[in-house]
């Protein structure tokens, strides 16, 4: 292998390592964003938040819950699954949004 081939090979591996670091960072950001989304959904489904500490009627709370579930449906159908630990610890039922249902 001549020195030009070796340089090209070294550059390719350097770029591959750089790309791997970028994609690893992006994956971590993605995972963090998905967890934040589902934590928000779980928090909004908590009884005290859903019923606004008893300040809204059951009918209004049910409407609010339906809206939250429609949002969750959209995310799930786009491939943003609820992490198991969040679904398992939610006051409401998020089991249907887990990847491993």
Image (cartoon, rainbow, N blue to C red):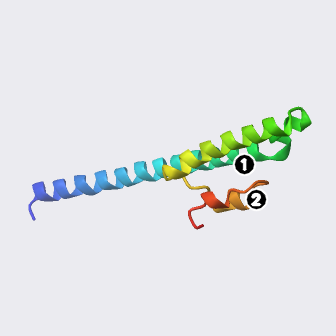
Residue 4 vs residue 70: left or right? left
Q: Position of residue 36 (x, y in %)?
A: 64, 45
Q: Is the C-beta separation of discs 1 and 2 under 8 Å?
A: yes
Estimate how packed mark 1 is, as few (under 14), some (14 to 19) or many (20 or more) residues with alpha carbons within 10 Å: many
Circle 2 SS class: helix
Q: Quadrant of the N terminus?
A: bottom left
Q: Is residue 69 above or below residue 85?
A: above
Q: Position of residue 100 (x, y in %)?
A: 58, 67
| Label of residue 42 in the image | 1
Give the residue drawn at x 65%, y 62%.
84
Give the residue drawn at x 89%, y 32%.
55
Give the residue drawn at x 72%, y 57%.
93
Q: Position of residue 6 (x, y in %)?
A: 16, 59
Mark before the other along the chain sequence, 1 or 2: 1
Give the residue drawn at x 62%, y 50%.
35
Q: Quadrant of residue 99?
A: bottom right
For disc 2, the marked residue is 89
Q: Which residue is at the far top?
A: 55
Q: Nearer the viewer, residue 27 or 99?
A: 99
């Amino acid at each position: 292998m001549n020195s030009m081939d070796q340089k090209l090979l070294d550059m390719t591996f350097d770029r591959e390592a750089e790309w791997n670091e970028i994609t690893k960072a992006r994956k971590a950001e993605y995972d963090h964003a998905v967890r934040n989304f589902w934590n928000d959904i779980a928090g909004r489904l908590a009884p005290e938040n859903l019923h606004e500490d008893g300040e809204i009627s059951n009918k209004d709370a049910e409407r609010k819950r339906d809206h939250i579930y429609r949002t969750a449906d959209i995310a799930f159908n786009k491939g943003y699954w609820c992490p198991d630990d969040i679904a398992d610890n939610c006051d409401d039922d998020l089991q249907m949004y887990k990847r491993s249902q």
